């Protein structure tokens, strides 16, 4: 499910609605290792499958921030705004990581528009992203991300 709008102003009429759910993506060890290299976070729970197999999750898990870093991918798949000059990451209001993302699992996101307002010629949109692991009871991440459309 994807929502397409012509302009950012069209988002003002969609507040409170679920805008889309993305396709599943597989979180593999290569992606986790690349993220560890990019951030310098080489904690064994993420990058050492042998040691992690004996740990609390029975294997390696993705970094919480790796999951969060997929927010732009989820947003662009769930919400298409056709005409705008720029979409700027303005920040985050709230982020939680209620459950791990085991390496090898599939992840998808659902996007809800929780707020939108006109701010000096730009539209500020607040999207709630819920990251779901295939087969898991709890979401892996729930985040509110703020985007400025100009």
Image (spheres, rainbow, N blue to C red):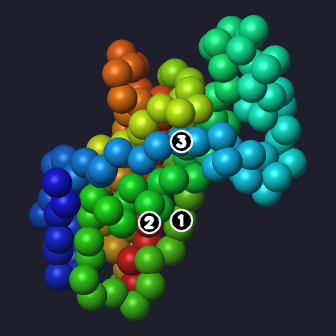
Q: Earlier in the sequence, mark 2 or mark 1?
A: 1
Q: Earlier in the sequence, mark 3 or mark 1?
A: 3
11 to 65, vertically: above or below: below
The answer to which of 140 and 148 lies nearer the viewer is 140
- Can the viewer see residue 111? no
Contact between marks 2 and 1 (CB within 8 A): the answer is: yes
**What residue does disc 1 label?**
90
Numbered label attached to residue 147: 2
State the CA–CA distance, disc 2 to disc 1. 5 Å
Look at discs 3 and 1 and give the one toward the viewer. 3
Q: Position of residue 83 (x, y in %)?
A: 27, 88
State the CA–CA distance, disc 3 to disc 1. 26 Å
Q: Residue at x 40, y 90 (%)?
A: 85
Task: Using the rendered view, name the quadrant where residue 103 is placed.
Answer: top right
Q: Earlier in the sequence, mark 3 or mark 2?
A: 3
Q: Position of residue 53 (x, y in %)?
A: 71, 14
Helix, strand or loop status at disc 3: loop
40 to 141, vertically: above or below: below
State the CA–CA distance, disc 3 to disc 2. 25 Å
Helix, strand or loop status at disc 2: strand
Contact between marks 3 and 1 (CB within 8 A): the answer is: no
Helix, strand or loop status at disc 1: strand
Farthest-out residue, left: 13
Left or right of residue 102, residue 51 in this image: right
The answer to which of 41 and 90 lies nearer the viewer is 41
How crowded pointer 2 is (Cα within 10 Å; few <14, some 14-19, many 20+) is rated as many
Task: Using the rendered view, name the quadrant where residue 139 is placed.
Answer: top left
Q: Residue at x 64, y 12 (%)?
A: 58
**What residue does disc 3 label?**
27
């Amino acid at each position: 499910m994807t929502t397409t709008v012509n302009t950012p102003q069209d988002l003002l009429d969609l507040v409170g609605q679920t805008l889309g759910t993305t396709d599943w993506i597989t979180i593999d060890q290569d992606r986790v290792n690349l993220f560890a290299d990019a951030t310098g976070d080489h904690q064994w729970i993420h990058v050492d499958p042998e040691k992690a197999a004996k740990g609390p999750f029975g294997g390696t898990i993705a970094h919480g921030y790796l999951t969060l870093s997929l927010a732009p991918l989820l947003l662009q798949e769930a919400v298409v705004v056709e005409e705008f000059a720029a979409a700027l990451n303005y920040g985050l209001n709230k982020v939680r990581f209620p459950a791990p993302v085991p390496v090898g699992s599939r992840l998808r996101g659902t996007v809800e528009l929780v707020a939108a307002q006109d701010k000096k010629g730009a539209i500020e949109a607040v999207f709630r992203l819920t990251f779901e692991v295939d087969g898991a009871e709890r979401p892996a991440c729930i985040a509110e991300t703020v985007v400025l459309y100009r």
